[in-house]
Image (cartoon, rainbow, N blue to C red):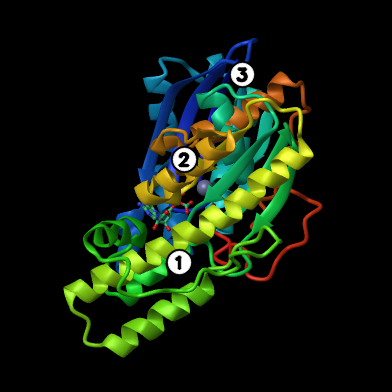
């Protein structure tokens, strides 16, 4: 089965063709991602109107290119899948309308995919792992710990009560005069810095609940930076090192509690797995810390290749393929985009969770 996937929920325009065989093996025949980072960089963040326009300008060409690179025609595609939410509504409309139009014209079933489900199912494409597993999604718009129990069966164990982790990296960078996106910049500066010169708070560390909070940390960075002004290059490096150390410790605390919760919920799973996804998973220090924690606790640590950790359309096509494989009914072409669309419909929304509401 071959599925065309379309992703336009934030600032990446993406199209992909993914194949799934009857045994559940996935193969990416093509995956094209066009980042709009350069368009948004002057504004220090994603501008929704610019994003929507940029998607319109390139999406049809990208889909053509995805088919071409996969060496297939639209007739040889079995289904079309497009992200319907959560995300920036202008961008979602572009991808969803395009997907529906192609499905209708080519008479193929259409699947409206939750972007978070795309991230959640990626390790089944890359590593063929079985349900259930634990997912830590850390990106510019979301910070969530999710129990992935089965296809369409997700339990959110924790989420951020204020800023997403990637957002905290980006805001910290901005405060310190580093360019956008801030994550890689902060990581680079932290490498040079002395993590012991300053101590920053570890929000929610030691608390029973599995949520995250990063706005207090960001405020502490602002206060520290103000108190040191004018900042030298060494000050910036040392603050970044202190920030990253605080984040690493906080994450390890939250994640180690989640691993325990997983064990309690699924005591019979022999080789449980923690999967990380989202742009922040690119951070080497955080990644190494989580890897170490997992090996101490008998968990497998799975980090899909970076290109599949960040936003892409292969994960959307794959989510469509998984649903098609279960003979899930196709979605109606009346389906509307949803700027907010929690994976776990039972979980109460938390104030500010994924505030940008845009990136996942
Ligand atoms: O998943 P992603 O590419 O886009 C969405 O948010 O959907 O994640 C982007 C986020 C940005 O906030 C960026 O600063 C952060 O991931 N990021 C990092 C690193 N690389 C990217 N954060 C920390 N360390 C990094 N090396
Ligand atoms: Zn995402």
**Residue 86 shows up from this direction:** no
When asked about the image quadrant of residue 350, the answer is: bottom right
Q: Secondary structure at mark 2?
A: helix
Most extreme residue toward the right is: 346
Labels 1 and 2 touching (C-beta < 8 A): no
**In the depicted view, which residue is nearer to us: 272 or 57?**
272
Alpha carbon of mark 1 to alpha carbon of mark 2: how far? 22 Å
Q: Is residue 196 left or right of residue 215?
A: left
The residue located at (47%, 36%) in the rendering is: 303
Alpha carbon of mark 2 to alpha carbon of mark 3: how far? 38 Å
User: Residue 50, position in %: x, y?
Assistant: 41, 61
Q: Residue tagged by mark 1?
A: 168
User: Residue 49, position in %: x, y?
Assistant: 46, 63
Q: Earlier in the sequence, mark 3 or mark 1?
A: 3
User: Residue 319, position in %: x, y?
Assistant: 62, 31
Q: Residue tagged by mark 3?
A: 78
Q: Is residue 132 left or right of residue 203?
A: right
Q: Residue tagged by mark 2?
A: 291
């Amino acid at each position: 089965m071959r599925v065309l996937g379309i992703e336009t929920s934030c600032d990446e325009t993406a199209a992909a063709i993914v194949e799934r065989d009857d045994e559940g093996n996935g193969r990416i025949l093509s995956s094209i991602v066009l980042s709009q980072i350069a368009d948004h960089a002057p504004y220090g963040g994603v501008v929704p109107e610019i994003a929507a326009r940029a998607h319109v300008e390139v999406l049809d060409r990208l889909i053509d290119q995805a088919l071409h690179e996969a060496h297939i025609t639209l007739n040889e595609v079995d289904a079309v899948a497009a992200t319907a939410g959560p995300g920036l509504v202008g961008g979602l409309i572009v991808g969803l309308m395009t997907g529906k139009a192609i499905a209708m014209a080519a008479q193929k079933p259409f699947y409206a995919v939750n972007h978070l489900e795309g991230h959640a199912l990626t390790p089944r494409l890359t590593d063929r792992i079985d349900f259930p597993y634990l997912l830590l999604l850390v990106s510019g718009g979301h910070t969530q710990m999710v129990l992935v129990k089965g296809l369409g069966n997700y339990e959110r164990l924790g989420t951020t009560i204020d800023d997403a982790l990637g957002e905290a990296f980006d805001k910290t960078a901005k405060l310190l005069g580093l360019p956008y996106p801030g994550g890689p910049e902060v990581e680079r500066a932290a490498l040079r810095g002395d993590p012991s010169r300053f101590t920053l708070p570890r929000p929610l560390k030691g608390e029973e609940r599995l949520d995250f909070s990063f706005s207090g940390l960001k405020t502490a960075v602002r206060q520290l930076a103000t108190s040191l002004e004018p900042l030298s290059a060494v000050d910036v490096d040392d603050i970044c090192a202190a920030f990253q150390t605080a984040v690493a410790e906080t994450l390890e605390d939250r994640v180690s509690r989640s691993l325990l919760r997983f064990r309690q919920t699924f005591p019979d799973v022999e080789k449980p797995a923690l999967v990380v996804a989202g742009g922040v998973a690119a951070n080497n220090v955080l990644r190494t810390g989580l890897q170490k924690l997992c090996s101490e606790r008998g968990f497998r640590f799975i980090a899909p290749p970076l290109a599949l950790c960040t936003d892409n359309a292969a994960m959307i096509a794959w989510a469509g393929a998984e649903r098609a494989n279960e003979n899930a009914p196709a979605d109606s072409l009346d389906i509307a985009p949803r700027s907010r669309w929690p994976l776990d419909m039972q979980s109460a929304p938390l104030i500010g969770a994924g505030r940008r509401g845009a990136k996942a």
